[in-house]
Image (spheres, rainbow, N blue to C red):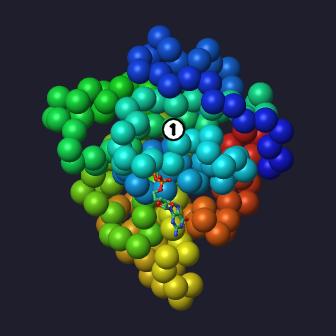
C-alpha cells in the first residue's frame, strides 16, 4: 500500500463526534502497551501520528485517522489498565461497545496481543466478545522481534489455544517492519469491491 496521505481527524468521546461514515474503517484494539501506536505509525510510515504512550492507557478516546482519503484507521482505547476506576472503565467499555456494535463502515477489527505472553484474561474476554460480532476479526501478535524466530510458531499456537478461537493470527514486528505487507494485503482485500 502506498500511503499518499494520513491525517488525524478527531479524538471522539461520544458518538456524535464520530466522523461522517462512508469510508471503510479498520479498528485496532488491544491491552495498553501492546504496541498499538507503534504499529499504526509503522503501517502509515509516520513517526508519531498515533501517540506512542508514555503513560500506558492514558488515551480514553476513540481516535480516527483518514488515509489516502479512502479509508480510516480507528484507534480504540487500550483496555486492562489497572489504575482506572471501575466506573471509568465501564464508561469507556460501553463507548467501545457502542462503536463496535453500531458503526456501519466498520469492515475489520484487529485485536493486538503480545506474542511473548499468553493472552491475559482481558484479552480472552475481549476476544470472545469480538467473535460474537458480525465483523471480520484478525489477531495480530506484536513484538515478534522480542522472541527467537524458532519460537514464533509455538507462541502463535499458545495464543490460539488460550483465545480458544479459529481466527487468523498474524505475527508482526512493528519495530523491525516485519509482517506489515501481509497486513496491507489483507486490508486491501477487505476493501475490494
Ligand atoms: P500502546 O500502548 O499499545 O500504543 O503501545 P506502544 O506503541 O506505546 O508500545 C509500547 C512499548 O512497546 C513501547 O516502548 C514500544 O517502543 C514497544 N514496542 C512496540 N512495538 C514493538 C515491536 O514491534 N518490537 C519491540 N521490540 N518493541 C515494540
Nearer to the camera, 10 or 48 = 48
Query: Extreme top residue here?
Result: 16
Nearer to the camera, 166 or 33 = 33
Query: Extreme left residue here?
Result: 86
Name the residue located 80 percent from the left edge and 43 percent from the top edge.
Answer: 3
| Numbered marks: total | 1
Name the residue located 47 percent from the left edge and 22 percent from the top edge.
Answer: 12
Camera sees residue 165: yes
> Image check: 25 left or right of 152?
right
Find residue 48 and report its image quarter: top right
Residue 72's place in the image compared with 111, above or below, is: above
Query: Extreme front residue here?
Result: 54
Residue 70's place in the image compared with 189, above or below, is: above
Name the residue located 45 percent from the left edge and 69 percent from the top edge.
Answer: 115
Find residue 19 and report its image quarter: top right
- Residue 182 screen position, x and y as percent: 70, 61
**Could you tell me which quadrant the C terminus lies in?**
top right
Task: Describe the element under mark 1 as helix, strand or loop.
Answer: strand
- Residue 31 screen position, x and y as percent: 37, 51
Camera sees residue 26: no
- Residue 156 screen position, x and y as percent: 46, 73
- Residue 8 screen position, x and y as percent: 63, 30
Q: Which residue is mark 1?
A: 75
Amino acid at each position: 500500500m502506498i500511503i499518499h496521505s494520513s491525517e488525524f481527524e478527531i479524538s471522539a468521546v461520544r458518538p456524535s463526534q464520530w466522523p461522517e461514515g462512508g469510508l471503510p474503517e479498520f479498528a485496532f484494539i488491544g491491552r495498553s502497551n501492546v504496541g498499538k501506536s507503534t504499529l499504526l505509525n509503522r503501517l502509515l510510515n509516520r513517526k508519531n501520528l498515533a501517540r506512542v504512550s508514555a503513560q500506558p492507557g492514558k488515551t480514553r478516546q476513540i481516535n480516527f485517522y483518514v488515509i489516502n482519503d479512502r479509508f480510516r484507521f480507528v484507534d480504540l482505547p487500550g483496555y486492562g489498565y489497572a489504575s482506572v476506576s471501575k466506573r471509568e472503565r465501564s464508561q469507556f467499555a460501553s463507548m467501545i461497545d457502542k462503536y463496535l456494535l453500531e458503526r456501519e463502515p466498520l469492515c475489520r477489527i484487529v485485536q493486538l496481543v503480545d506474542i511473548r505472553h499468553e493472552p491475559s484474561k482481558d484479552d480472552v474476554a475481549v476476544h470472545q466478545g469480538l467473535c460474537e460480532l458480525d465483523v471480520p476479526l484478525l489477531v495480530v501478535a506484536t513484538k515478534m522481534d522480542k522472541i527467537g524466530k524458532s519460537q514464533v510458531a509455538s507462541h502463535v499456537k499458545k495464543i490460539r489455544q488460550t483465545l480458544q478461537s479459529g481466527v487468523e493470527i498474524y505475527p508482526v514486528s512493528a519495530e523491525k517492519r516485519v509482517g506489515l505487507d501481509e497486513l496491507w494485503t489483507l486490508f486491501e482485500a477487505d476493501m475490494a469491491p
